[in-house]
Image (cartoon, rainbow, N blue to C red):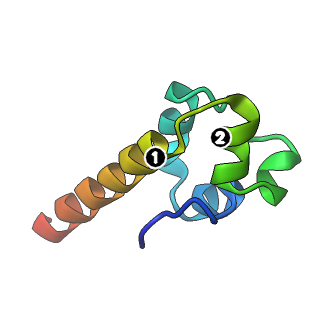
Amino acid sequence: MTITKDMYIAEVLNDHRDTVPIFFRNGLHCIGCVMASGETIEEACLVHGLNCDQLLTELNDFIADQADVQAEA
């Protein structure tokens, strides 16, 4: 699964709970709020003045690394 800017934050968290620290590190501390279920990653980045491309890169790199680890197991 590739995470895109059009995905809802809650959607990503439902599928990949272990990405929470990445959201926190990038300044999205309100991932548990009501807006997380109705706000896309791009919208959240715009509202908080964050670099959406950087966040997406970190999220997708993390998920790819996790897939590699699982494939090796």
Indicate the position of residue 50 as horizontal and vertical percent values: 59, 32
Tell me the kind of residue under disc 1. Asp
Where is the C terminus found, in terms of image quarters?
bottom left
**Does residue 22 lie above or below 57 as drawn?**
above
Query: Circle 1 — which element?
Result: helix
Q: Quadrant for residue 45, please give it.
A: top right
Instruction: Identify the image quadrant of the N terminus.
Output: bottom left
State left or right for residue 13 relative to residue 35: left
Please give the name of the residue rendered at 24% of the width and 54% of the height, measured from the top-left corner.
65
Q: Which labelled disc corresponds to residue 68?
A: none
Earlier residue among tags 1 and 2 = 2
Q: Residue at x 47, y 42 (%)?
A: 55
| Marks 1,2: beta carbons within 8 A | no
Using a 10 Å C-alpha cutoff, classify the residue at mark 2 as few (fewer than 14 neighbours), some (14 to 19) or many (20 or more).
some
Viewer-closest of 55 and 71 = 55
Q: Quadrant of residue 58?
A: top left
Q: Label 2: which residue?
A: 45
Task: Identify which amino acid the numbered label 2 is placed on.
Answer: Cys
Q: Position of residue 32 (x, y in %)?
A: 77, 41
Inter-mark Cα distance, 1 to 2: 9 Å
Residue density around tag 1, few if under 14, some if 14–19, many if 20 or more, within 10 Å: few
Question: Where is mark 1, residue-wise?
Answer: 53
Q: Percent from the top left, x then y, of residue 23?
A: 56, 37
The part of the image, by quadrant, that contains residue 64 is bottom left
The correct choice, above or below, for 53 with respect to 49 in the image is: below
Asked if residue 34 lies left or right of residue 51, the reply is right
Tell me if 59 is positioned left or right of 47 in this view.
left
Which residue shows up at 45% across the image and 50% down it? Answer: 56
